[in-house]
Image: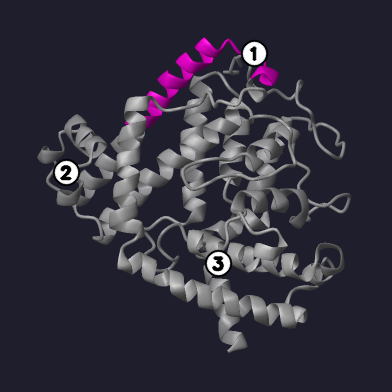
Amino acid sequence: MVQELKSYAVTDALSKGRKFAEAGHLYRSDFERDRDRVIHSVAFRRLEGKTQVFTPGVNDSYRNRLTHSIEVAQIGRTIARTLGLNETLAEGVCLAHDLGHSPFGHAGESVLNGIMKEFGGFEHNRQSLRIVDFLEHPYPEFMGLNLMYETRLAIARHESTYDSPKTGVFSESNCSLEGQIAGVADRIAYNCHDLEDGLLAGIIKVDQLMQVGIFNQAREKINADRIEDSLIRNTRTAKTIIDILVSDCIETSREKIKKSGVETVEDVLGLGESLIAISDSNNEKLKELEKFLLNKFYLHEKISQTAEKVRIWLGGLFVMIYEEPGIMPRYFQNLIEKEGAERIVCDYIAGMTDRYCLKMLEKIN
């Protein structure tokens, strides 16, 4: 069944198109092609080897950046489809939102930002846009993936609790509703699956969570006390929080869109306020969960002790490659004259998986 889109949904016909003109495809829409180009990109495949919270390889059951992105896309599709928006665009943006993440998660991002302080800094949303616009190179006709304007805008403007985009590439006050969905879907996904992983790892204890409102709300909804298997009980509780928040987002966003009076995509882009949102009451509950995860999980010594190691690893690797750029593949070497050695070395390291980074360090040492 063909989905009927709202007047303020992004469509192929009203899109600003691609930087480099391309003929349309026989049986795929422009935004389907964008999504597929993201999926087939090198950067997307490498997300499998990049830290979400736990370093890949510690336990195969924990999330990595790739599985996180897939979970974000699932949530994003549900919200977009229910609200009558462009589901494929929302999915593509969700899948692409972390392409620019460095190895070792936010610790790695912080280290690279410090190293690049005098050279424009490093921020993974800007890096995601740089990847799709410049660093990926599967086509001989142009650099990058040549994505649609609205996809690129949404990637650049991706925003959540730990994402604060700073890019002057676009003049719009906001991105499309589909792009806004990616921000909320990301926030819902990482809070709930980080909670689940923390419980699985034994770092987070259920008795600690009994003071967290939305956790208890989810437990009551599924009659958690009647579930004997603790793993199933904890997993169902985390997934029920997702259901609560997604349902709330759909209803809250529907009402905000209606009250805003927007009728076109241009109306949406001109608003400083995002219309895809969680209700105030559930937003406060989610903030409470975020505070809990920060204090009891992200700052736990088993997680935070890696940060100092990452500073030493990436700092040493940057100096070594900067002094001997021949370590990099020829493609990166050829970009130094135009982009500067610092930026290209940063690009190269940011694209590494955790495993490859450690492997490089072994060779150097």
Which numbered disc, 1 or 3, marks the residue that appears first in the sequence? Answer: 1
Dot 2 and dot 3 residues touching (CB under 8 Å): no
Q: Residues within 10 Å of mark 2 (few under 14, many from 20)?
A: few
Q: Residue at x 81, y 62 (%)?
A: 339
Task: Say if residue 197 shows up in the picture.
Answer: no
Quarter residue 45 falls in? bottom right
Q: Was residue 128 drawn as part of the magenta stretch in this picture?
A: no
Specify whether 119 is left or right of 77. Answer: right
Specify whether 292 is left or right of 251. Answer: left
Residue beneath label 1, please?
7
Question: Residue 335's x, y, as percent?
Answer: 83, 65
Report the disc number at residue 210: 2
Q: Amino acid at mark 3?
A: Val
Q: Residue at x 31, y 68 (%)?
A: 301
* Local secondary structure at mark 1: loop
State whether the magenta stretch is mostly helix, strand or loop: helix
Q: Residues within 10 Å of mark 1 (few under 14, many from 20)?
A: few
Question: Residue 224's x, y, as percent?
Answer: 16, 38
Q: Residue at x 58, y 76 (%)?
A: 315
Q: Mark 2 and mark 1: span between their CA atoms? A: 44 Å
Which numbered disc, 2 or 3, marks the residue that appears first in the sequence? Answer: 3
Q: Amino acid at mark 1?
A: Ser
